[in-house]
Amino acid sequence: GALAKMSSKAVPTAFHHLLKALDHRGSLLRVYSQNIDGLEKKAGLNVYDPPLFTQADSKCILLHGSIHQISCNACCAARYTHSYSEHLESGILPQCPDCLTKQDQRKIAGKRARGVPFMLPNVVLYGQQYGNYEYVQEACGLDLGVSSQSKRKIDLLLVVGTSLKIPGTINIVKQFAKLLKKDQPKSKAPRTIYLDLGSLKQEWKCVFDLWIQADCQVVSTLLLEKLQTDREKPETR
């Protein structure tokens, strides 16, 4: 609860605003984010949320879930964290309202009561499989052209601010890099770019065409200024 409150006060960074600017100009296909703070949504991106957006029209897929949601560890029903902030701050996990309703229905029917599960933060901890693995797979299928519904063409992979240590993330990055190298093997322009302050391990140097060792916020600010300048240039006829 406290962490959710802290993140609710946080504001999008220059990098988040760059993502939205690219989305606005029609250049952003998808963002696969390992963040759980919800800043992509604050920046204005359509974040995958079953009641609102499908995989096809969501611009952001949260690989590790969101601190702003809690879900039942039995029936997977999801609720927004702020509705249960008092419970969470007191250290008491709320029981699933859907399972409580089913419990009441069992009692009315004269059936034996079962234990009601708790609602847990909807985030993936280190070493766990993605909580929403099916929708991650479906989104990847659309973007990689595997799905019959695919209508998009990826031409650039930008990997930013990650140490590339999580197995699921590693797999996604390698799938997209492989697709780009297969579709455009003789392209001179970089198609796979790694941007991070850290060093790039030798095993990844054959995956990325370009490695930029820099602060992503500084680079994002420069790119935002460039996009703004391009928009302000008078059209030539």
Image (spheres, helix red, strand yellow):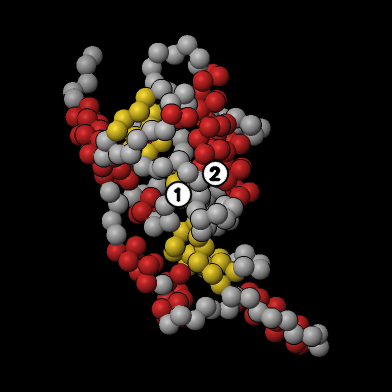
Mark 1 or 2: in front is 2
Instruction: Kindly identify which residue carries mark 1.
Output: 34
Asked whether the viewer can see residue 26, the reply is: no
Q: Secondary structure at mark 2?
A: helix
Specify whether 191 is left or right of 96: left
Establish if 88 lies above or below 107. Answer: above
- What residue is at 55 percent from the left and 25 percent from the top? 179
Residue at the spot of label 2: 167
Residue 107 to residue 31: above or below:
below
Residue at point 40%, 56% (across, down): 38
Q: Residue at x 26, y 39 (%)?
A: 215
Q: Residue furthest right?
A: 110
Where residue 199 appears, as percent x and y from the top left, is 34, 35
Question: Image quarter for residue 151?
Answer: top right
First of labels 1, 2 by sequence position: 1
The CA distance from mark 1 to mark 2 is: 12 Å
Name above or below for residue 52 compared with residue 67: above
